[in-house]
Amino acid sequence: MSFAFTALVSMLIVLGIMVLVHEFGHFAVAKFFKVRVEVFSIGFGKRLFGFRRGDTDYRLSLLPLGGYVKMAGETPGEARTGDPDEFASHPRWQRVLIGLAGPVANFILAFVLMTGLYMMHNEVENYLAGPAITDFVPQDSPAGHAGIQAGDLIVRFDKDKNPTWEQVRMRAALDVNSQVPVTVERTVDGKTQTFNTQLYLADPTKGDDFEIESVGLMPKVQNSPLGVRDVMPGNPADKAGMKTGDAIVAINGQAVHSVAAVMAFLQQTQGKPVDLTIQRGDQTLQLTAQPIWADDGAGHLGYRLGFHPAQAPFHVEQLPLSRAVGQSVTFNLNNSGYILDVLKRLVTRRSNVQQLSGPIGIARETGEAVSMPGWQPLIALMSLISLNLGIFNLLPIPILDGGMILLLLIEGTLRRDLNQEFKERVYQVAFVMLILFAAFVMFNDVAKLNILSKLKP
């Protein structure tokens, strides 16, 4: 089965589930308030097939990238009969709750998915329970200034002796913006030496989003070189000749064992070309790549090579319900601001519009998640899509749920309905703008495939 077919089918299934849950949220609350629902559709456009039960036509439509619930008297400009089961005949607070129900359903789905995953199949990287051995340490980082080097073994971190990386992470989060004593063991010329130092854990977030890597402590997550799961077309790694299945042994002669180490090294070189030592089967190759300044897909800017890493060694745990709930809440809170952060970066020009992805990008991500071993990549991706679909629909843009809610709140404040013709024009303009935006994102998706360059002789 080709990757393109797998990606397409997996995207349609995943988006179908997201849309079904979102629209069911609207549907259920509308039914609860006795609003007549005329259509429940997965997809847009021409009706392919379905069935009618009561007042509602349940259908599957031609274009599967979305869906809708059509309620009586909902559309601006639609003739009103005054029936009590029409959407507009209900109190505004009920209509607001109906609008909120879709995004809330997506939030609930994201929470349930991750809770179930953590209870059944929580993948924990092996290095967390192992000795705290450092990978590459940037010279200009707090760890570099403290004299810590790559390959050092941390035998004391604050009060913890012989800590694991998990203990180091937990202790560091408690000690942010303070100086802690650190003792490392270092092998020099075959002899083990002990080195005592002080490390300042600088963190302006005061521990809320603190990562140990931010102070230059890069955990050695594996003893083997960093594997390459796939290479992004048109990016520096692709142009340099890197291929799926390769392993990055070293950059400019510096051994690296994690993505964090690679990223830190690229930031230190400030965008200069780097020499990559690549292991490809039984061969050792030397490649040269020119890093680019870009977004990593999660709102973080920096120098990139453009590849996805192979999964680090891990083991599976089954968490009890209480811990699984906590982990799920943390995961969803940490990822809930992605769309807002992307939009903010676009408005402030801190990010490039080329980082946006549409259906093709989603298909590529779902295809990769399905191809990876285990359920965690796919479930985590579904949770992220559901979470961000809910947030996107709450944006105060007319024709989205957030826009409808905003207009209802404005009418509630004014204690009168806005002019019907005015609302129709607002919805029309918003619809055209969203169509243009969607077309741009899809064009951007196609451009990322680098098809035109591949057609050149």
Image: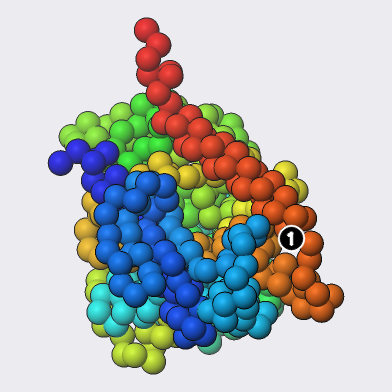
Residue 333 in picture, x, y percent from top left: 54, 74
Residue 239 against residue 244 in the figure, above or below: above
Residue 168 in picture, x, y percent from top left: 48, 76
Number of numbered tags placed on the structure image: 1
Residue 189 against residue 2 in the figure, above or below: below
Residue in the foreground of this view, choosing between 327 and 39: 39
**Dot 1: what SS?**
helix
Residue 44 as seen in the image, left or right of residue 121: right
Q: Residues within 10 Å of mark 1 (few under 14, many from 20)?
A: few
Q: Residue furthest left?
A: 1
The residue singled out by tag 1 in the image is 420
Residue 390 against residue 82 in the figure, above or below: above
- Any part of residue 380 in sight: no
Residue at 43%, 18% in the rendered image: 453
For the C terminus, give its image quadrant. Answer: top left
Residue in the foreground of this view, choosing between 385 and 157: 385
Residue 387 as seen in the image, left or right of residue 393: left
- Any part of residue 361 in sight: yes
Residue at 84%, 75% in the rendered image: 414
Residue 187 lies in quadrant: bottom left
Residue 368 against residue 107 in the figure, above or below: above
Q: Residue furthest top?
A: 457
Q: Amino acid at mark 1?
A: Gln
Residue 249 lies in quadrant: top left
